[in-house]
Amino acid sequence: MFEFFVFAFVTAITPGPNNSMLMASGIKFGRKSSIPHFLGIWFGFTFLFFVGGFLLSFVPNQVFEYLQYIGYAVISYIAFKIATTSTSVKEEKVEKPFTFLQACLFQWINPKGVVMAVSGLTAFNITNNEGALIYFLVLPFCVGIWLLLGERLQNTLKKSKVLARTIYIALAISMIASLLLA
């Protein structure tokens, strides 16, 4: 079970759609406003792992193929939105961070998350209950670091539009790069 804990920690802390979006949310909206997004990732992925582990055996491979393409399209769109995030202080339109429900539902089309769940359940000798519990314990720390890092960068990036644009583009690229792993 220790091997799975290491797997869960590494997969949860490395760049991917959830971490990139949460860091961007921390930069743009701060920690307090991004808490529902954080909680949605935490509970949503744990639920995906728990239920997904049970349901995986009943889902035809073709469904995964279609979900994969839908996930690619959604993540590409979100990466584009992050890369083109406005760096100006005054904004015409009101933007909001992901809600709890949006973050929960995103887990079901997140290719990295689905791959983490499928590979974790098939490569290690654990039950979906054990795996979900380990992710439940690991995720707050791993995704929380990204949120706090985003919040810490918030004031610095407000002062430098070039650095802010660079960070947003790097986050978008890391999201797209994570698709290559899926």
Image (cartoon, grey):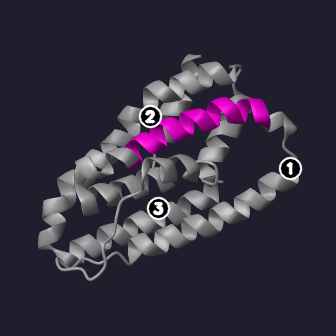
Q: Earlier in the sequence, mark 1 or mark 2?
A: 1
Q: Residue at x 38, y 53 (%)?
A: 22
Query: In the image, residue 65 lies at what x, y percent?
Result: 79, 58
Which comes sooner in the sequence, label 3 or label 2?
2
**Extreme residue toward the bottom, this view:** 92
**Residues in magenta?**
37-55
* Residue 162 inside the magenta-drawn segment: no
- Between residue 51 and residue 19, name the one nearer to us: 51
**Quadrant the C terminus occupies:** bottom right
Specify which label sits upstream in the sequence, 1 or 3: 1
Q: Residues within 10 Å of mark 3 (few under 14, many from 20)?
A: some
Cα distance between the residues tagged 1 and 2: 28 Å
Q: Which mark is residue 61?
A: 1
Above or below, 75 against 37 in this view is below
Amino acid at dot 3 = Ser
Check the image and report above or below for 176 versus 106.
below
Q: Please state if 25 lies on the left or on the right of 99 as rendered.
A: left
Q: Magenta includes 46?
A: yes
Going by the numbered disc 1, the residue's amino acid type is Asn
Mark drawn on residue 174: 3
Q: Observer-nearest residue: 126 or 40?
A: 40
- Classify mark 1: residues with Cα within 10 Å, few (<14), some (14-19) or many (20+): few
Q: CA distance from mark 1 to mark 3?
A: 27 Å
Residue 142, image x, y percentages: 39, 37
- Residue bearing mark 2: 139
Other residues around mark 2 within 10 Å, as few (<14) / some (14–19) / many (≥20): many
Question: Which numbered circle lies on residue 23?
Answer: none
Mark 3: secondary structure: helix
